[in-house]
Image: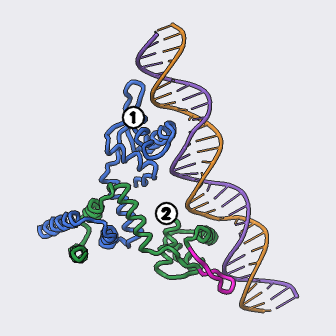
Chain colours: A blue, B green, C orange, D purple
Amino acid sequence: MIPQPTNGELQILRILWKQGPSTVRQINEVLNQEREVGYTTTLKLMQIMHDKGQLSRTKSGKTHIYTALLTEQDTQKQLVDKLKDSLFQGSALKLVMQALGDKSTSADELKQIRDYLDELSDESEND
Amino acid sequence: MIPQPTNGELQILRILWKQGPSTVRQINEVLNQEREVGYTTTLKLMQIMHDKGQLSRTKSGKTHIYTALLTEQDTQKQLVDKLKDSLFQGSALKLVMQALGDKSTSADELKQIRDYLDELSDESEND
DNA sequence: TTGCAATTACGAATCCTTTCGTATATAATT
DNA sequence: AATTATATACGAAAGGATTCGTAATTGCAA
């Protein structure tokens, strides 16, 4: 059971997924584009994430380079499943309808979803 | 800006959505079907939710009857949007694909989604 | 090698959620 | 009216996340 990443942890994971392995300074700089965070705050959080096994790190000179051990996919799945179970009675259908329901989804995206549904149907035919 | 309900708050909201207005005792009984919780724990949480404006209450004899002020729909939307923005770069498409991607969705559900997509397309044509 | 700048380590403070014990209030029952 | 059962109110403790100040360490540069 991997415990769910906290909000702060997710923020850091997002940056690592996007940029790849990074130093505390690099992460902190990106973070500060969104909100003001002290350097040692970011450091501490990344140390905790390392303790928790969410990040690995290697030493390069005197600095540590951190790498995400959780994949974006797995984390997405974990959180989508949780939301599905806790608010949509486990129904992917309900969740999807809610996600699409606000009409902000473009026609192009809708088409892509349709194509994806076709793929899924094809696969199940071949079971 | 309605702050996001916490986990404990969501648990109570779910029961209220399902059962309608309820007393603390009623909520606590349902809660205890899932996990052991003291009565005053549930009471306190519902009092806090009342303070926060998530629940209203009316007095009936010596007991309070609580009602959810947040709707299930609004809360679903709030949490889906948050997940979409924070983990899927704001893309409903990506979120939907992740939600459907684990192959646990039945053919019937897939069909329902397809029908729903048709509805959405029809609507946009009429804009 | 000595000192400087950057980095890490450590510990504490703060904030929020969750939990529950105890006290108080209220209504029904005897 | 006194007793009992049930409900609410209050306050504190425990646990976790977040924040950051300060100390210790490290590598480089003068």
Quarter of the image where one finds residue B28: bottom right
Q: Position of residue D12 (x, y in %)?
A: 72, 57
Question: Can you see residue B7?
Answer: no
Question: Which image quadrant: the C terminus of chain B?
Answer: bottom left
Q: In percent of the image, x 12 and y 70: which residue is there?
A: A125
Question: Mark 1 falls on what kind of element?
Answer: loop
Spatial CA span between label 1 and label 2: 31 Å
Residue with the mark numbered 2: B4
- Residue pushed farthest front? B127
Q: Say above or below: B127 vs C30.
A: above
Residue A124 percent across, percent down from the top left:
16, 68
Q: Which residue is mark 1?
A: A23
Q: Position of residue A40 (x, y in %)?
A: 51, 36
The amino acid at mark 1 is: Thr
Is residue B91 covered in magenta?
no
Q: Total marks drawn?
A: 2
Let me know if marks 1 and 2 both belong to one chain.
no
Does residue A26 sit above or below B110 in this rendering?
A: above
